[in-house]
Image (cartoon, helix red, strand yellow):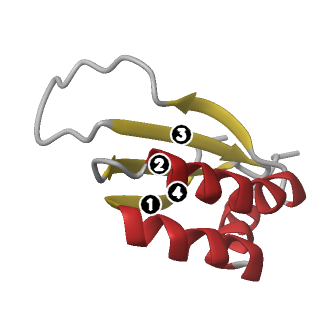
């Protein structure tokens, strides 16, 4: 019997200088959505080694029970409130990807 593959957010972000306090607002606003959809942070900031390509200052990997849960979290009304804050104070990319079984 196969199990549903997990889903992941892979986020790469450069926050604008002087936005630390507003970034805290983003985190606080996003937290209820992450809790609701079973998010588990696997990497959040921390040291990086830019092996190839262009890097960003903050790199985050979030695991969800499924790709459907990852999508539901991202497109939820609660997370979209947080995304609006983040988009004002940072440049970045977020991709939602299905894991392997």
Residue 22, percent from left and from top: 52, 57
Q: CA distance from mark 3 to mark 2?
A: 5 Å
Q: Are marks 1 and 4 in contact (CB under 8 Å)?
A: no
For marks 3 and 4, give the one nearer the viewer. Answer: 4
Q: Which callout, 3 or 4, points at the residue further toward the start of the chain?
A: 4
At x 67% / y 40%, what residue is drawn?
Answer: 101
Residue 58 relative to residue 63: left or right: left
Q: Are marks 2 and 1 in contact (CB under 8 Å)?
A: yes
Label drawn at residue 61:
3
Label drawn at residue 22:
4
Q: CA distance from mark 3 to mark 4?
A: 21 Å
Q: Are marks 3 and 2 in contact (CB under 8 Å)?
A: yes
At x 62% / y 43%, what residue is drawn?
Answer: 62
Q: CA distance from mark 2 to mark 1?
A: 5 Å
Residue 98, percent from left and from top: 58, 55
Using the rendered view, name the quadrant where residue 71 is placed. bottom right
Dot 1 corresponds to which residue?
Answer: 95
At x 66% / y 35%, what residue is drawn?
Answer: 41
How packed is label 3: few (under 14 Cα within 10 Å), some, or many (20 or more)? some
Q: Which callout, 1 or 3, points at the residue further toward the start of the chain?
A: 3
Q: CA distance from mark 2 to mark 4?
A: 21 Å
Dot 2 corresponds to which residue?
Answer: 10
Q: Which callout, 3 or 2, points at the residue further toward the start of the chain?
A: 2
Residue 37 relative to residue 19: left or right: right
């Amino acid at each position: 019997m196969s199990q549903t593959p997990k889903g992941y957010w892979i986020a790469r972000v450069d926050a604008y200088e002087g936005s630390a306090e507003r970034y805290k607002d983003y985190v606080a606003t996003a937290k209820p959505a992450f809790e609701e959809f079973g998010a588990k942070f696997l990497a959040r900031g921390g040291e990086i080694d830019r092996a190839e390509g262009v890097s960003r200052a903050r790199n985050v990997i979030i695991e969800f029970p499924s790709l459907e849960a990852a999508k539901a979290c991202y497109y939820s009304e609660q997370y979209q409130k947080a995304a609006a804050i983040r988009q004002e104070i940072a440049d970045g990319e977020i991709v939602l990807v299905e894991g392997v079984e």
